[in-house]
Image (cartoon, helix red, strand yellow):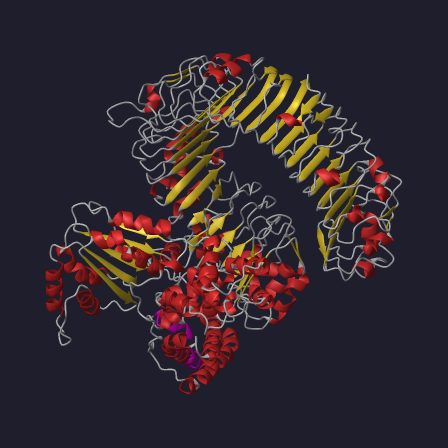
Amino acid sequence: MDEVASLLLSPFFQVFFERMASGEFLDIFRGRKVIEGLLHKLKISLLSMSALCEDAEEIQLTNPAVKEWLNELKDVVYDAEDIFDEIATELLQRKLDAEFQTTASKVRNSICTSLSPFVKEVEPKIKEVLDKLEYLARQKDALGLKEGVGRESSKRLPTTSLVEESDIFGRNDDTEKIINLLLLDDACGNENLYVISIVGMGGIGKTTLAQLVYKDKRVKEHFNLQAWVCVSDEFDVFKVTKTILEEVGSSTNDDIKNLNRLQLTLQEELMGKKFLLVLDDVWNENYANWKVLSGPFKSGAQGSTVIVTTRNDNVASVMRTVSTHYLDMLSEEDCWSLVKHSFLDGKFDARSELEVIGRQIVKKCEGLPLAVKAIGSILRTKLDVDEWEKILKSELWDSPIDYTNILPSLRLSYKYLPSHLKPCFAYCSIFPKGYAFEKDHLILLWMAEGLLPEPRNRTMKEVGEDYFCILVSRSLFQQSCGNKLGFVMHDLVNNLANFVSGQFNFRQEGNKTRHLSYFRTRFDNFKKFEALYKVKRLRTFLPLEFSIRDNNLTKKVPHDLLPKQRYLRVLSLSHYENVTNLPDSIDKIKQLRYLDLSFTAIRSLPNSLCKLINLQTLKLSCCDKLVGLPRDMRKLINLRHLDITGTRLIMEMPIQMGRLKYLQTLTTFIVSKTSGSCIGELGNLTNLRGKLAILNLQNVVSSTDALDACLKEKKHIKDLVLKWKADTDTDVLESQRTILDCLQPHSNLESLTIKYYSSKSFSDWVGHHSFSNIASLYLYDCKYCCSLPPLGQLPSLKDLSFIQFDEVVKVDREFYGDGSFSIKPFGALKVLRFKQMSKWEEWLSESGDFPLLQELYICDCPKLTRELPIHLPSLIKLEIKECPLLVSSLPRAPSICQLNLTGCNKDLLKDLPTKIQILKVGGFDALDSLAIAMKESSYSLQELEISNCSSLSMGDLPSTLKSLSITNCQTLELPMHQIFSSLKKLRLQNINDSFRSFPLDLFPNLSDIFIFGCEHLETLSDQLGLDLMISHVRIINCHSFVSFPKGGFRASKLTLLWVWSCGRLRSLPDKMHVLHPSLEELQIVDCEELESFPDGGLPCNLKSVSITDCDNLVAGRMGWGLQKLPFLKNLSICGERGDVESFPEVGLLPTNLTALQIKNFPNLKSLDKGLQQLISLEELLMDNCPMLKYMPEEGLPASVSVLRIDDCPLVKRQCQRKKGKEWRKIARVHLKMMDDELIE
């Protein structure tokens, strides 16, 4: 299919058109002239309409009628693709059903004889599509559309080197970086030409940055010649060369048509001169063009430089860039400065109200200068609060095009995309603005939608990775700041995707919707999807992550709505925790290619799922209730990706898994003992790649079976897990070595994990130097191994772990792989762990071992006594735990900043490293030596954790300390003469004696205090009365705690106060309403003697209050004064008080409350009239109120949209749909859930 056709037709059409020409297809439809003719006519018509597409794509921006025509055309093409897919699926299904016949002719005859009903069904569909295409074709002349042409888009003004610096903000650092590069004459080595590329999305300010550099005085003095050329989208070597000549001052004859003459003249002009050439807005990806253009440049003097501005990283690569500068978005402050000074200067009176709105408007531009300037040009004409409010509430995209050039500018990025990438980019409009999507996920969606071809020697996923990288390189996708695996589109790029995708995405209404995505919520009920019943040809049903917990979906979606969507290709129900099964009718969705059930409570899959012969991706990760896979999995012949990570209840694989010849991802293979697939089935899965975990290897019956898995031939497997069952019978232990020998993987492996291996030694391939790519090696519970495998000669090994090697006594030079190899052992290792090695006594090492080791963990090695490595120059973190006999000096490690010594010999504390920032010690009887060690060291200590020390005398603490945690100490002595002014965070847990009062005034800058289980703590004290900086106070399980400081304590920044299980506490802090004005969250749990809130009430800014098991406090609830809290939104009341029969009373709760939880009231019988006063209440939760039977007589407040009832059997019965007496009172509530079941 040619480039123009691929604008409209997906790669699926190409495959189908090729099949139409095949002998098999012709044989099947031979004699059926009508259907054969219709299909041929449809093919010609589609290709003909595709020829109009390029012209229509260009005109639609300015002609709404053409945009509508194009949308109609795309809709018909979707219909055509569905028809072709139906035919292809039907033929494939019939072919599979007839496979039991032995000859191809019998198969063909079987298919042909049973095809008539299907042909009768599909013929009218083809005719309908043809009629629509012919209708659209007749309109082309009226719309002025021409076949096979892409007309010239309106030309943008060429850029120049002139710039007004006073209008530029936020680019000083970028400018200086590039100027510094320019002033380094030796930056390009021996080459005469130095190329610097400035790369970024359209409108980010690449040209502006180049202009700033170009006109800088230092740059002008540094170069003999300067030239500026706006190249733009047409890279005409002749024109560009001619423009450069004109720029350097050489007059050219307009009659010269000879490129050779031009280049010779330019070469002469540049000869021996140090020049700076700016090529602005370059789109050329053809290296040959650049090579010709740059030929004369090499005559310049050393230090000559070309600055290229481009949106495309590939352009920078083609031009042999020495240094690439990626331009970031402007900060919000710089964006506001740009608007304020460039567009509002002299008109803006700095009124605070306008500035607040203006800053919010500018924030929507997300740092894109082009958008900032566009919005600034609008704001300058509307200096009115109401007008600015309207702009704030509108979409930036809705700004009049007359005022902005955002759309045309960004649309160039789309225009110059290769045509096969345009549908892939348009599809991304399914993602909302700001949504971070993952590369692998998007590629699987592209694949399911038929947007990726599958060449003979490459997988669709590999093609998709290329496509994705191109979109990244062209700045259409950007790395997400908050998610290392995520990518985002700038809001304006997202708008562009929506513009070009037309009316087929994001709609939940209208029958042309093809792709639906939405954010999951806690309760997605039927009303949310009701409009989809009008949609007949939905292709994508994709919930997106908004809240990853407690998501529930109405059963009508999987069991009623979705089976009616026969054209679905992408279906996800992931993260819905109430999805427990699929209907048998799932097989009706024959075109389904992507099914995601991960993180659901699905228990079993219907065998009818195995009729989905187009299915490519099946995601079942973390379905921890799934007990097995359907028995006929082998029939999913197109399956490419099967993810069953974390499905712990699956005990075996279905039979004949080896028939899934296209399978590329198989995260886990469970070896069957009897009925399922044996390990030899893996041998037929030649395309496996990525990660593979093989479990239950104790069920492998012979070495021949293990060899049949052909792991050594699977060169694309990068991460391999080999796992036996723990505590395997001792009579089969020695056979494990033979099995491991036969499971040798390909040497491309990057990560290896071996678990529960019980032979005495490892196979020779484990640690062999041929595995040069292994970066991670994890060996767990190999308890019969007497020695460690020789791993020191693995050149890429970075992370190494040994866990539970019970028989290893000595780690000697064999571990390092010494021999004829010349490389230093463990030359790349960064992380090394030894844990739970009960007999390990000695570790031999030499100077020079582990030169790059950064983290070393030695844990639970009770017999280790001998030396640790003497010198570890790169070590940053050292952890030694439960090694009581180790008396070795700590390694010399000049870079170490984190140290954990727990359950060790006290002698290890004598010579602490001097640059420690984080220190954790524990398990010592007394720690007097710690204070001495800290005093003698030149400390920069910031975090200190001390645990399980019977007696602790702290002494003076370092002045740099920011965090202190002390846990499980019988006796604690703090230096009472010291003010801990640097400390920000303090945790005291289970301090038993000599700790009755905690002096807050010794910690003036503390922001977070956590006191837990301090049985003798009675009070907090504050003698100085300072305004403390504390923001969080949590006091838990302190049963002797009686009081806060008398008269209260001043903490104006306190936002959170928790008091749990303090049975003797009688009052909260005094004057809370004055001294804690910022308090937002209050939790009181199990404080039996607390009867009331302080005089003056609670702070007015409280947003959340939780009261649990405080019976006396609940008894006095009418004096709480909560109705005086204007910002209180969430209230939870939980208790065992038996005299509460009706709740809440009139006037008890504030009308602004939005969420109310009532829990654990054993005799509560009805909800009181006070509930009706809560006119803002949105969410009502009732839990474990077994006697509750009645809702308020007047019903629930009209504002309630979420009702959840758990473990309240009487009211649940009364609220049954239509049957219960209380149903009418809750019927109109939008989302109702009872005992984890959505009620429709």
User: Which one is nearer the viewer's eye here, 200 or 741?
Assistant: 200
Q: Is residue 244 left or right of residue 770?
A: left
Q: Which residues are magenta?
A: 21-40
Up/down of 986 relative to 349, above or below: above
Report the number of numbered marks: 0
Q: Is residue 364 visible?
A: yes
Q: Which quadrant does the N terminus fall into? A: bottom left
Q: Is residue 218 left or right of residue 170?
A: left
Up/down of 1075 relative to 52, above or below: above
Magenta highlight: main SS: helix
User: Which one is nearer the viewer's eye here, 948 or 721?
Assistant: 948
Up/down of 90 relative to 916, above or below: below
Residue 174 locus on image (x, y percent) = 35, 51
Residue 358 locus on image (x, y percent) = 54, 60
Residue 586 locus on image (x, y percent) = 58, 60
- State the residue at coordinates (14%, 52%): 301
Determine if the magenta segment contains residue 403.
no
Toward which corner of the image does residue 1173 lie, by quadrant? Answer: bottom right
Toward which corner of the image does residue 152 lie, by quadrant? Answer: bottom left
Q: Is residue 92 visible?
A: no
Determine if the magenta segment contains residue 26.
yes
User: Which one is nearer the viewer's eye here, 431 or 276?
Assistant: 276
- State the residue at coordinates (35%, 28%): 791
Up/down of 1093 relative to 661, above or below: above
Q: Is residue 912 left or right of residue 765?
A: right
Q: Which quadrant does the C terminus fall into? A: bottom right
Toward which corner of the image does residue 373 lie, by quadrant? Answer: bottom left
Residue 208 locus on image (x, y percent) = 35, 59
- State the residue at coordinates (31%, 26%): 825
